[in-house]
């Protein structure tokens, strides 16, 4: 039963990431070192910081989802170049974030781990 749970979790994670990648425009694809958002510390315990490296424009928002259940855990609009999120309400696990531009388009997606 546990093995099935891990397999389904992996499939969900891949589906979320592929959906985010397919919705990006060609000019804003962030590959490897060209990522817009740097997250640290990863794995995180009490907080996670989102640091926008380049192409920062006012009006960006961040959405954070539970990587297994797909439940939206956090959302904030009009983020600053450096935004820190308190993880007190987050359980141990993998989380997916989406950086969304002012037009509602996903610019970048990534993941981070919460460990306690």
Image: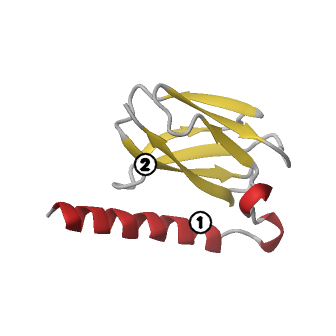
SS label for mark 2: strand
Say above or below: 54 vs 116: below
**Residue 8 image-quadrant placement:** bottom left
- Is residue 30 or residue 104 the one in the foreground? 30
Image check: 61 left or right of 86?
right
Outermost residue toward the left in this view: 1
Image check: 41 left or right of 24?
left
Query: What residue sits 73% from the left and 64% below the top?
Result: 31
Could you say which disc has been placed on residue 20 in the image?
1
Residue 28, horizontal then vertical, whole percent: 79, 64
- Is residue 84 or residue 32 the one in the foreground? 32
Of the two numbered discs 2 and 1 in the rendering, the one whose residue sits closer to the viewer: 2
**Residue 21 image-quadrant placement:** bottom right
Residue 11, horizontal then vertical, whole percent: 38, 70
**Residue 61 image-quadrant placement:** top right
Quadrant where the C terminus sits is top left
- Is residue 35 or residue 78 the one in the foreground? 35
Image check: 116 left or right of 29?
left
Residue 96, horizontal then vertical, whole percent: 51, 52
Query: What residue sits 72% from the left and 37% below the top?
Result: 51
Could you say which disc has been placed on residue 94 in the image?
2
Categorize mark 2 by other alpha carbons within 10 Å: few (<14), some (14-19), many (20+): some
Could you say which disc has been placed on residue 59 in the image?
none
Categorize mark 1 by other alpha carbons within 10 Å: few (<14), some (14-19), many (20+): some
Residue 58, horizontal then vertical, whole percent: 81, 40
SS label for mark 1: helix
Quadrant where the N terminus sits is bottom left
Query: What residue sits 59% from the left and 66% below the top?
Result: 20
Between discs 2 and 1, the one toward the N terminus: 1
């Amino acid at each position: 039963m546990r093995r099935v749970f891990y397999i389904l979790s992996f499939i969900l994670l891949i589906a979320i990431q592929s959906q985010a990648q397919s919705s990006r425009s060609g000019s804003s694809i962030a590959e490897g070192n060209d990522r817009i958002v740097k997250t640290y510390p990863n794995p995180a315990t009490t907080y996670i910081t989102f640091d926008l490296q380049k192409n920062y424009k006012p009006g960006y928002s961040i959405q954070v989802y539970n990587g297994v259940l797909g439940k939206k855990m956090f959302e904030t609009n009009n983020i600053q170049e450096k935004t820190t999120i308190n993880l007190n309400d987050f359980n141990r696990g993998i989380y997916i974030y989406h950086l969304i531009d002012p037009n509602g388009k996903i610019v970048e997606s990534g993941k981070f781990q919460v460990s306690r």
